Amino acid sequence: MDLQKLLNSMTVDEKLSQMTQLITGIITDKNDGPITGPMRKFGLTKDTTSRVGTILGGSGANHSKDLQNFHLSEDPNKIPLLFMTDVIHGYRTLYPVPLGIGASFDDDLAEQCCAMAAKEACVSGIHVTFAPMVDLVRDARWGRCMETTGEDPYLNSRMSAAMVRGYQGSIDSPDRLGKYKIAACVKHFAAYGACEGGRDYDAVEMGDHTLRQYYLPAYKAAVDEGVELLMTSFNTVNGIPSSANKYLVRDILRGEWGFDGVVISDFAAFYEMISHGICENEKECAKKALDATNDIEMMSTCFVKNGKQLLEEGEITEKQLDEAVMRILKLKEKLGLFDNPYRYADSEEEKEICLCKEHRDLARIAAEKSAVLLKNDNVLPFNKNVKKIAIIGPVADHGMIGGWFCCGKHTEAISVIDGIRNYAKDAEIVFARGCGAHPAEMAENVSEMIAQAKQVAKDADAVIMCLGEEIDMSGEAHTRAKIAVSDSQTALIKEVCSVNKNVAVVYYCGRPIALEKVIDVAPATVIFWHPGTEGGNALANLLFGEVNFQAKLPMTFPREGQCPYYYNRLNTGRPNGSQGYCLNYSDSPFPPVFPFGYGISYTTFSLSEPVLSSAEMTENGEITISLSVKNTGDRSGIETVQLYVQDVTASVARPIKELRGYSKVELNPGEEKSITFRITIDDLKFNTLSGKYEAEKGLFRVYVGNSSAINEYKEFRLV
Ligand code: BGC
């Protein structure tokens, strides 16, 4: 397709429509039928809606084909529509929410899961997913922790690249964007996770060093992996909404990083610049968004309604429009839409592939690999021959599929009751809800419900308590001021544990929850996030020891009131632990309940003292760090060994330690393996006071352990 010729033939209105994204309901207004309302609200004519370049939603092989046919019959230029939607943790088969994938510390798993989601979405007519979301988050109150892989820039960057590879195919692969692949859209640029107080949409105030050093790397990792699109964020960064942020989008993203893909707004974010208080009307929104080199406006209509006038008044140039439209057309061409506007949408394959056994198996394995065992006082694994199992809790009797369930259905997911029943076929299974999941759900009869739960638990051989957050308690706009386990759930745990000692509490959550009041009560505690379609089967395998736990926390689990809290903080001039006036709380212990990187299993591991290859490293040299890891328990297992580095003295204060590597080591009982980490100059670089990204000579410390709470270190000097 000669894209330049096509572009030259387009009118200004057609270009502006191409730069607009609406939901399907607005576009398919064939007979001015049911969606007249939204059309009126937007004040759009049928000419505009029939020419839009992209739509939000519209999945299902036949449905997407119908929409494409309808669009092509109306569009004067016959430019195929691009179908975009949020395929975040699966399309029809759902795997754990991204925070759970982060907990796996398993890049290959992240890639496989996204590849599976891409395959299902691709045959169902989707071309682009609004994923991965790689916003760094340090505050557990933010509802969208669930959609990130956590608090660490290094882990997030590796996950970001792996997810892009999964959706699109790897950057050098001949199959990239081919059959079963879709384009990825990294989001939300930039620093959306740093909203003040963890309040969704709130302002971000941040110095350039912190922005570049900690918040930007995961977006950059996606760009380096060839991500095709990027979404700007709702928030302001230092007073400028990302939609109009020339520094972020034009200068850093396009200028410094050389990104020439499509930039899309978040939902109605251009229009929201009026509420932000930087634009008086939609016309100003359109100008500012275009000047920042945005290409597609999602679900508002500032471009289509004002672009022409802005052009006539000389406020914008046709070159700006042409550049944006060309980027969109190029993406359509890369995806093969000009050759086949339906791409790989195929209702037969859709039936065969979506929710197939292979995908359910992968979803189950992912849930098993994402579950974090925090505590186990010899109660787990439960004996396989137990006669009576009590299942208690408000989230045990339905599938916990996670907040972005896309085309997945609760009814297709395995609840805990289903999973345990599938596993322990001969056991008697009894259930009591016990209390509500929402803190507000303090049913009048809560004491009655607790009494029932006690009754059910009393003579059971194993008690599984499924507590924490319902899936609608995290996600967009679900900030919580209080992240502690609710009073009713706390009371329930205490009462149940008073009548039975064989209790495992399993928390479902989309964020870290504050566990200090409950962690000592039950003998075993598991964090299961929102595990997806196969959650119940995965949990049965874990609790009965068919598989071992291996995940680690991708975020610090703080105490109530400690947020924000993250492991890679600065030391301060008065570090915690020094005498008198120092970094501390006067009404709470200083450490969190569980640190980043923490997680145990059914076996134990010992790590030998790490040996550095040299006490000095030159600019072109490298240091290797070698150690052996031994399984000292009586079950096979996988330990995630973590490498942290501290730049002791630098021109800008550096964190007390930063993750720089991890390695998953699989060991049989008694087995020992050697592992080696490498550090080169690239691992020591940072944004220095002089504004450069480089390493500074001096002393470095190296920590190797099985969580971030490790104090022993070795030193070397960069000379
Ligand atoms: C969210 C985005 C999402 C978009 C489209 C917005 O509200 O912030 O993450 O991609 O909606 O569904």
Image: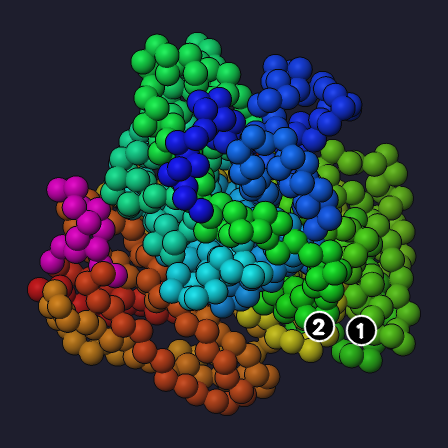
Q: Nearer the viewer, residue 560 or 15?
A: 15
The stretch in magenta equals 683-697
Task: Quickly name the residue at label 1.
Answer: 423
- Which kind of residue does numbered mark 1 sit on? Tyr
Q: Answer with the quarter of the image where residue 431 lies.
A: bottom right
Q: What type of secondary structure mainly makes up the magenta span?
A: loop
Visible in this render: residue 585? no
Residue drawn at x 89%, y 51% is: 452
Dot 1, how many residues are within 10 Å of its Cα: few (below 14), some (14-19), or many (20+)?
A: some
The disc label shown at residue 541, or none: 2
Q: Is residue 237 above or below residue 544?
A: above
Q: Residue 174: where, in percent of width, then height? A: 43, 66
The answer for how far apart the CA atoms under marks 1 and 2 are is 8 Å
The C terminus - image quarter: bottom left
Q: Answer with the quarter of the image where residue 273 lies.
A: top left
Q: Nearer the viewer, residue 383 or 551?
A: 551
Q: Residue 568: where, in percent of width, then height? A: 35, 51
Visible in this render: residue 12? yes
Q: Answer with the quarter of the image where residue 425 lies.
A: bottom right
Dot 2, how many residues are within 10 Å of its Cα: few (below 14), some (14-19), or many (20+)?
A: many
- Which kind of residue does numbered mark 2 sit on? Asn
Q: Is residue 159 above or below residue 490?
A: below
Going from the N terminus, do you reach mark 1 or mark 2 first? 1
Disc 1 + disc 2, Cβ < 8 Å: yes
